[in-house]
Amino acid sequence: MAAVQETVDRVRAIEVDAYKYGFVSDIDSEKPPKGLDEDIVRYISARKAEPQWLLDWRLDAYRRWLTMTPPRWARVKFPEIDYQDLYYYAAPKSTKAAPKSLDEIDPELLRTYAKLGIPLVEQEILAGVERPRVAVDAVFDSVSVATTFKAELAKAGVIFCSFSEAVREHGELVKRYLGSVVPSTDNFYATLNSAVFSDGSFVYVPPGVRCPMELSTYFRINEKNTGQFERTLIIADKGAYVSYLEGCTAPKRDENQLHAAVVELIAHEDAEIKYSTVQNWYPGDSEGKGGVYNFVTKRGDCRGARSKISWTQVETGSAITWKYPSCILRGDSSRGEFYSIAISNGRQQVDSGTKMIHLGKNTTSRIISKGIAAGRSQNTYRGQVSAHAKATGARNFTNCDSLLIGDQCGAHTVPYIEAKNSSAVFEHEATTSKISDDQLFYCLQRGLSGEEATALIVNGFVRDVLQQLPMEFAVEAQKLIAISLEGSVG
Amino acid sequence: MTAQRAPASNAAELVLAEQFRALPREVASPARAAAFRRFEEAGLPNRRVEAWHYTDLRAALAAPAATLGAPDAAAIAEARKRLAVLERLAATRLVLLDGYFIAALSDPPPAGVALAPTPPLAPPASDPVLALNVALAQGGLAATFATQTAAKAIEIVHLVSAEGAGAIYSRVALTLEANAQASVVERFVGAGAATQRQVSTWFDLAPGAQATHVALIEDAPALHVESQVVRLAERAAFDGFGLVAGGALARRQIFATLEGVRGRVGFSGLGLVDGLRQADTTLEVVHAAPHGQSREFFRHIVADEGTGVFQGKVIVKPGAQKTDGGMKSQAILLSPHATMDAKPELEIFADDVVCGHGATVGALDAQQLFYLRSRGLPEAEAEAMLLEAFAAEAIGRVADPALAEALLSATRVWLAARGQGRRM
């Protein structure tokens, strides 16, 4: 009962549209002028001292982007974005010369991360013996500011660094894998990202290595009117294993901030990648003013036989979420998993789901999606499961459940099930309901208040997914869920 | 979800526009013109139109055939011979030949049913293909079922005259007054590979009315597009079933709206797909009032290089509390090249509802096959037995036992033909 009480306390403690991470850090930053043209692309590339091939790749993407139109099929509504009214690059000034150690980082930045509860300072973590160790790469606006535990990871042969650093020091690897899962022509937002991406994380786990700790990235948009375009590339070589977490926050702003990231995962033979997201971008206030537009392309490629990619996401933030972490099951007997909790409140709009593309033989996939809609929000699950003609023995199980709290919200399910192979076995089930009166009555009768009962039932509803999260994140996610639903209970 | 419209009309759309302009002066009306404008705005749907995601009508109807006119005396005489050997599925038979109601071939309506040869013009539809049907259909039938009457079953035979080369547009409008009961079978017979058929059936159910409907596609046109529009007032109930056993491209689209409280709909169907055929069932059930109930249950058996499509969308409007919705789509794929696409959707704007859907796709269970073969059944027979059982469960939704038996024997015919094809 302790956890439930905690959840309820948190709900009580918070005002209607309170957003814990809504502070702005006053940090000097360097920004080129607003707007986007080839010069900005060149500027970003030059600022990062990138090789010619990468600049060419960016310019190519930019020229392609000019010919594209934003996708309109998702169930989200927002005013046209003026792409010339955004800053495409913002770097905290004090990190102009790349920081050699944590000491060189602006103390204000470190305080920001402390506020966020990110264990950036290694000693602190090492001192807390009980605490599981997590290596963190922190991305502030567009630039990766610090990566912890690098030395220890290097000992195991694991490369975990900012994207810019990877371009400098592991150029060959980046060149080989960049855009191989999400090509620069993939979709409007991914192409934009390919042109202007600023930074992000890079992970390479060599053959046979089990990454000794959880890797984690924290993203924060701080500057006004900036887009954040980070790019993450994770490669697990033969037989490797890595678990990666990302967390996101942004300050409260009246304007909408744009976040268009690309994440590419590559799993070779027998490799496994576990990718967990706790997304808590600023969702806007209860009237729908402000908030982050989260237009993200995430895709994993199970390239080798018996590889496995697992996506777990807890989505509570963002004014609009447009995101479909997917798996291309190319290797024989490879496996894809997608576990999702998407919670929307206020006037949030969520259109999220996954794609499982079965190409190899005996590939399996599993989708568990839990959507909770409250307030005046719209929450859509959109998913695709397809089996190619050669994908004999493909197997999928999908379960997507929606819970509605309040009569002003909407919950929608749009699954696409496409089997082109007779030996494919696909199962799909979905339900939508409100919290049942019987369950509520049972809890109330046992002496719980309405709020406590709702929190208890919601936590039970999402348990399948929470269990997939690394332990320390599961606790955080549970709290986030309670915060997201406040104001809707009772 | 709105597809962008190509600026210029394609050749097929120009042909259809020509056909619309060529309609006789006496049938032209503002309502038809509005319907055709709606069609022109949207154009022939392609796969970018969400409701047509798996069926590209723009490609399938690249060359619209000339519309078949009202049949002449010779055609009617010839049809009479063919109807004589067509086994009846209901006591009363009404006949549409090439889309036109022919009283001379039809029985008098049962007590409590009033017929009219030309249906009243339908309201403008949102679906472009339904709009096209409204704009171009000249023939059809309207029947009104009197209040408080339980009418005897009716079969409507959609017959195509011997040649059958051409386009057919027709509309059937069935109106049930308060507490009326109707049972209607629509059969599609006689079409050949040069027939392009676009029909619509409109059900309007007053409070407390009850209707059952069975559509049976037995022939093999190049194109069969069947739109069904069902409107239910309070306490009305509708049960519909469709068997698609033929047609190079068969598309059944159902639009049902539960406008009054405590309405109930049940839709079910069976798609038997072989060769290069495609059978698409797309339905949209709108719960616009509280306490509604909807059930959908569709099964497909897909062989050879066939494609089965099921798209079901249940929409619960704001305020339609206590809605109870359940949808299920199941398919068996018999060949490595068979395809099944399913898209069961929920769109829910009310919180106090229970809605669910399930979809499965798979092959025949190898263990079940093995069991039957170990009992000495040849493989083809064992397979047919299992498939018949799978089909029978869908057909089981049809309450009338004689009708269910007729559907089952049509299924057996298809299964046997398939078995023979395979042995060759």
Image (cartoon, coloured by chain):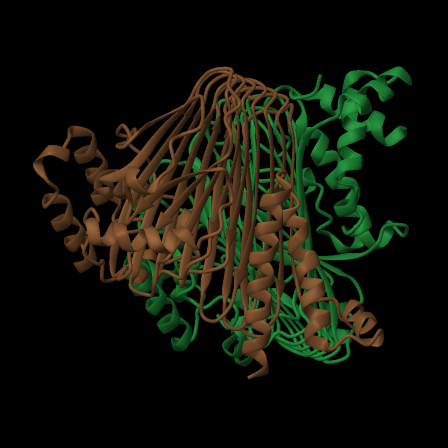
Chain colours: A green, B brown
* Residue A390 position in % (x across, y down): 58, 77
- Which quadrant, please, contains the C terminus of chain A? top right
Which residue lies most toward the bottom here? B424
Q: Is residue B237 left or right of residue A401?
A: left
Observer able to see residue B204: yes
Q: Nearer the viewer, residue B410 or A166?
A: B410
Q: Residue at x 29, y 60 (%)?
A: B162
Would you identify the image quadrant in which residue A484 lies?
Answer: top right
Q: Residue at x 39, y 62 (%)?
A: A195
Q: Is residue A293 left or right of residue A471?
A: left
Q: Is residue B112 above or below residue A30?
A: above
* Residue A468 position in % (x across, y down): 77, 52
Q: Is residue A47 left or right of residue A244?
A: left
* Residue A173 position in % (x across, y down): 56, 78
Q: Nearer the viewer, residue A176 or B261?
A: B261
Q: Residue at x 25, y 48 (%)?
A: B43
Would you identify the image quadrant in which residue B241 lies?
Answer: top right
- Which quadrant, please, contains the N terminus of chain A? top right
Q: Residue at x 77, y 27 (%)?
A: A455
Q: Is residue A232 above or below residue A109?
A: below
Q: Nearer the viewer, residue A478 or A201?
A: A478
* Residue A126 position in % (x across, y down): 84, 55
Q: Nearer the viewer, residue A82 or A142?
A: A82
Q: Is residue B46 left or right of residue B241?
A: left
Observer able to see residue A388: no
